[in-house]
C-alpha cells in the first residue's frame, strides 16, 4: 500500500464496479480492494437534470448496500455520463445507436461527468468532476471502423478516450483525463487520505 494512505491499512476497500477501467485505475493508487456489485435499476427519473445524473446513479449504487458493510469496510461506487446540449448520452444498445452518438459528438464539445460515492457505516460522501472534451470532425468511415473494431457498447457516449477514437478524434480536453475514463483519481485519493 502507498505510504500516503497508511490510515487505511486496517480497512477493507470494496469497489462496486465491473468496469475493467475503474479497477485498473484504482489499482494505480497502490490499493488493494475487492469487487462486489449489486444490481440496481439505473432508470433515470425524467425530472433529474442531466448534470445530476452521474451523482444520482452513484448514490443509488451505494444505497444498494444498505446493511452489508462491516465496520472496517469502505465502499466505492461510481458512475460516468456524457452530457451534450443538456442531454445524457448513455451506453448504446447497438451499432446504429453508437454511430448516432459518436456522429453527434463529431466536431463538437461535450461534457463528461463522473460521480464517486465513498461510504462506510458511519458516513457517506459523493464527489463530482466534470471534463470538457472536443472532437475534431470525424468521417463516417472512421466512426464505423471504431464501432466495429472496438465495440464500445459498455461505454457512456459510445466511446473510450483511451482507445483509437480518442487517439485520432479528441482535439482538446479541459479537465481530468481520468475523469473521462470514468474515475477522477485525484478526488478519490484526496478523500481517502482524509478518511
Image: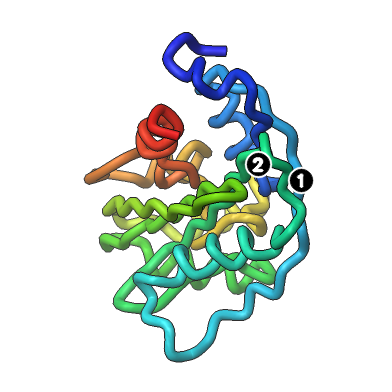
Q: Which element type, helix, strand or loop, lies under badge 1? A: loop
Q: Position of residue 31 (x, y in %)?
A: 59, 22
Q: Position of residue 143 (x, y in %)?
A: 51, 56
Q: Judge by depth and name the residue closer to the eye, 80 or 166.
A: 80
Quarter of the image where the C terminus is located: top left
Give the colour scheme of this rendering. Answer: rainbow
Q: Which residue is mark 1?
A: 36
Image mark for residue 78: none
Quadrant in which residue 178 is drawn:
top left
Q: Which residue is mark 2?
A: 15
Quarter of the image where the N terminus is located: top right
Q: Please report the residue visible at 55 percent of the width from the left and 67 percent of the height from the top.
A: 57
Residue 167 visible, this orientation: no
- Disc nearer the start of the sequence (1/2): 2
Residue 126 visible, this orientation: yes
Q: CA distance from mark 1 to mark 2?
A: 6 Å
Kindly indicate whether the residue at mark 2 contacts the one at mark 1 (C-beta within 8 angstroms). yes
Quadrant in which residue 67 is drawn:
bottom right
Circle 1 crowding by C-alpha within 10 Å: few under 14, some 14–19, many from 20: some
Up-down: is 142 above or below 93?
A: above
Q: Position of residue 60 (x, y in %)?
A: 59, 67
Decide if residue 162 is on the left or right side of residue 66: left
Q: Judge by depth and name the residue closer to the eye, 55 or 72.
A: 72
Circle 2 crowding by C-alpha within 10 Å: few under 14, some 14–19, many from 20: many
Q: Please report the residue visible at 40 percent of the width from the left and 37 percent of the height from the top.
A: 191
Up-down: is 177 above or below 158?
A: above
Up-down: is 95 above or below 36?
A: below
Q: Position of residue 152 (x, y in %)?
A: 62, 53
Amino acid at each position: 500500500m502507498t505510504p500516503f494512505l497508511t490510515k487505511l491499512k486496517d480497512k477493507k476497500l470494496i469497489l462496486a464496479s465491473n468496469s475493467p477501467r475503474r479497477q485498473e485505475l484504482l489499482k494505480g493508487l497502490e490499493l488493494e480492494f475487492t469487487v462486489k456489485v449489486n444490481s440496481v435499476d439505473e432508470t433515470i427519473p425524467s425530472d433529474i437534470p442531466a448534470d445530476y445524473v452521474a451523482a444520482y446513479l452513484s448514490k443509488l449504487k451505494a444505497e444498494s448496500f444498505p446493511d452489508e458493510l462491516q465496520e472496517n469496510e469502505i465502499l466505492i461506487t461510481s458512475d460516468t455520463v456524457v452530457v451534450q446540449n443538456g442531454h445524457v448520452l448513455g451506453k448504446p444498445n447497438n451499432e446504429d445507436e453508437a454511430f448516432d452518438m459518436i456522429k453527434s459528438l463529431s466536431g463538437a464539445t461535450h461534457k463528461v461527468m463522473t460521480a464517486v460515492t465513498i461510504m462506510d457505516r458511519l458516513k457517506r460522501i459523493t464527489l463530482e468532476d466534470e471534463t470538457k472534451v472536443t472532437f475534431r470532425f470525424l468521417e463516417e468511415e472512421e466512426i464505423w471502423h471504431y464501432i466495429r473494431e472496438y465495440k464500445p457498447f459498455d461505454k457512456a457516449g459510445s466511446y473510450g478516450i483511451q482507445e483509437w477514437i480518442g487517439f485520432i478524434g479528441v482535439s482538446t480536453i479541459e479537465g481530468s483525463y481520468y475523469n473521462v475514463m470514468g474515475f477522477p483519481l485525484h478526488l478519490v485519493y484526496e478523500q481517502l487520505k482524509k478518511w
